[in-house]
Image (tube, grey):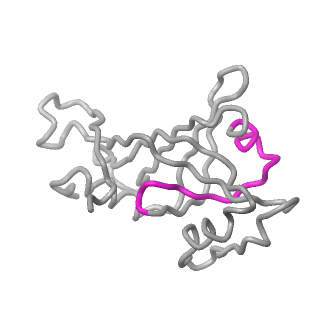
Amino acid sequence: MSLPEDLDALARTVIDGNRYMTLGTSEADHRPRLSPVYFTHAGYRTFYWVSSPDARHSGNIAARPEVAIVIYDSTVEIGQGRAVYIDAVASLVADEDLPRRCAEAFPQVDPGAVAFRPDELSGGAPLRLYHADATGFEVHLPGRDPRNAAGIDTRRRVNPVPQT
């Protein structure tokens, strides 16, 4: 498998080609908490998911909003890993922002997914909409990649957000 020449494009390819991300939050005792969540994104800047506000990762976000995200393709052959690492700040979407945020998060959905409406995610609803605003991106660059002179898997900073 060949990688795109442009590492920003690689990040977009990985993000667009996967539906689950691993969300990393921090417990009160500083231990990491990792949670796989189905996600959507808006412009590669904002990542959305729906969770119970009672989930541990949701409580962690309320207390410590800095999160780490990894999106990776687990189907590739050994040595061909492709991943995007994202630093972000996450929070619960406020009820008053739900109409705009739901339209952004669910403009179209994959088969089997739900395009939630604001009334399904507000007040005391058992599920709520969360978002993470990216503050930094890196991609995994395999040691076999010709752009990697060290020959050892590494990360490279990228910006997948299309420049206007």
Quadrant housing residue 115: bottom right
Residue at x-position 61% and y-position 69%: 100
> Does 89 sit left or right of 70 as displayed?
right
**The N terminus - image quarter:** bottom left
Give the x, y percent position of residue 49. Answer: 62, 58
Q: Residue at x 66, y 74 (%)?
A: 114
Q: How far across and how far down the image is residue 91, in percent?
A: 65, 46
Nearer to me, 80 or 96: 96
Question: Percent x, y for residue 2?
Answer: 19, 57
Q: What stretch is highlighted in magenta?
A: 43-60
Question: Is 34 in the magenta?
Answer: no
* Picture residue at 26% right of the left edge, 52% below the top: 8
Of residue 98 and residue 58, the one placed in the foreground of this image is 98
Residue 53 drawn in magenta: yes
Q: Which quarter of the rendered picture does the C terminus lie within? A: bottom left
The residue at the far top in this view is 29
Q: Where 32 sits versus 90, above or below?
A: above
Residue ID at (60%, 44%) = 90
Residue 63 sits in which quadrant?
Answer: top right
The residue at the far right in this view is: 124
> Number of labelled discs?
0
Task: Please state the horizontal and vertical placement of residue 140, each as a whole percent of the image.
Answer: 32, 41
Q: Tell me where residue 6 sits by quadrant.
A: bottom left
The reply, left or right, for residue 126 in relation to residue 37 is right
Q: In this view, does 45 lie above or below 102?
A: above
Is 118 situated above or below 134? below
Question: Position of 115 compared to 80: left or right?
Answer: right
